[in-house]
Amino acid sequence: MPMSGETCDYNSLSDPDPARLSCATALNELARFHWSFLNLDWYKPLLRKWVDGSCYAEIEQRLGYRLILLQSVFDNQIIPGNKFRFSLQLKNEGFSAPFNPRAAELILRHTNGSLHTFKLSTDPRLWLPGKIHTIAGEISIPADFRAGDYELLLNLPDPEPKLYPRPEYAIQLANANIWEAATGYNRLNHISISEPPIYYADSVGITVGKYDTGSLASFKDIDADTYDIKALNVSGGKATDWYATTSITALPPDKVSELNLIYGGQYSKKSVKQKIYLYNYNSANWDLMDTRSVGRAYSKIINN
């Protein structure tokens, strides 16, 4: 429940205690009873005492909530399809907590102005005074997220639809130089979202067939430089069986959330039955990813 009121005319008291007029008493009781509002029109002589006692400015700042960002830790470079980890520490140095419902959002703003909003599971009404509050978690960045430079923003808007877009109803953190008056956002920092890395073959093994021409560099471009394997005669016709390996270095293996397998090639004959497998180290088996008939025309297969 909001706490508000006004000061008294101490001349009307039969036995005013001078200590009750002091800044120390005012600050103690405003904090103890969690004041949010104070009538500045009454009683002005007492308010003047607080000005003279150098606590009036502090009372102005601390009435209601006063949220300060102590620390923000987050991934500053993200690959689409992976998790964005963050941790924010806020301290409420006000006398009370917000008493109206508030949304809490992290926003990624691209340099082109586009916004991507992620809801946070926290209730600012529980950010009690005198306490440090940690907001931490992970956000899934879609695999098709646009690469580029982004600003990371904290938005604490009024959840009412008509008030949500109005910056004057958003909570402004007390830190210097992070508030955007035009948007109501609090600027945290910049992050970069990179294109997913592409890994080409770093070794090739042939189990059925014979190496003809080409090198590992032949896998990187669609051009006349190709890696060629000659088929061998087997029961029922001709066949090739080969594999390529690569090492993922951008992330630890347990942090990889998605793989896209891209294969491109062609054959010297028509209507060749082709199967593509991916080795599963967990089961120690080859998992079938694609099967189709291909031929002399170049074909590109993407499996994700």
Image (spheres, grey):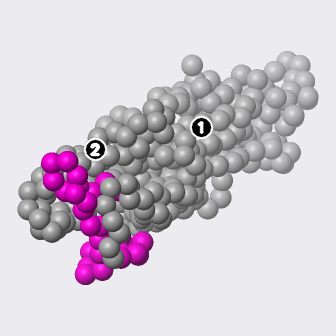
Residue 183 point in image, percent of width and height: 43, 55
Is 103 situated left or right of 56 in this image? Answer: left
Determine which quarter of the picture holds residue 12. top right
**Disc 2 and disc 1: Cα gap in Å?**
37 Å
Q: At which x and y percent is residue 243? A: 38, 55
Image point (34%, 39%), residue name: 287
Label 2 SS: strand
Q: Nearer the viewer, residue 33 or 155?
A: 155
Which region is colored magenta?
214-242
Residue on which disc 1 sits: 136
Task: Give the residue type that dot 1 points to.
Answer: Ala
Label 1: which secondary element: strand
Which residue ends up furthest to the left in the rendered image? 270
**Residue 230 vertical placement versus 143 (above, below):** below
Q: Answer whether residue 69 is magenta in the image.
A: no
Instruction: Tell me if mark 1 has few (under 14), some (14-19) or many (20+) residues whose alpha carbon lies within 10 angstroms of its own.
Output: some
User: Would you say residue 232 sits in the magenta stretch?
Assistant: yes
Residue 208 visible, this angle? yes
Task: Indicate the position of residue 286 as horizontal and vertical percent values.
Answer: 37, 40
Observer able to see residue 166: no
What label sits on residue 289 in the rendered view? Answer: 2
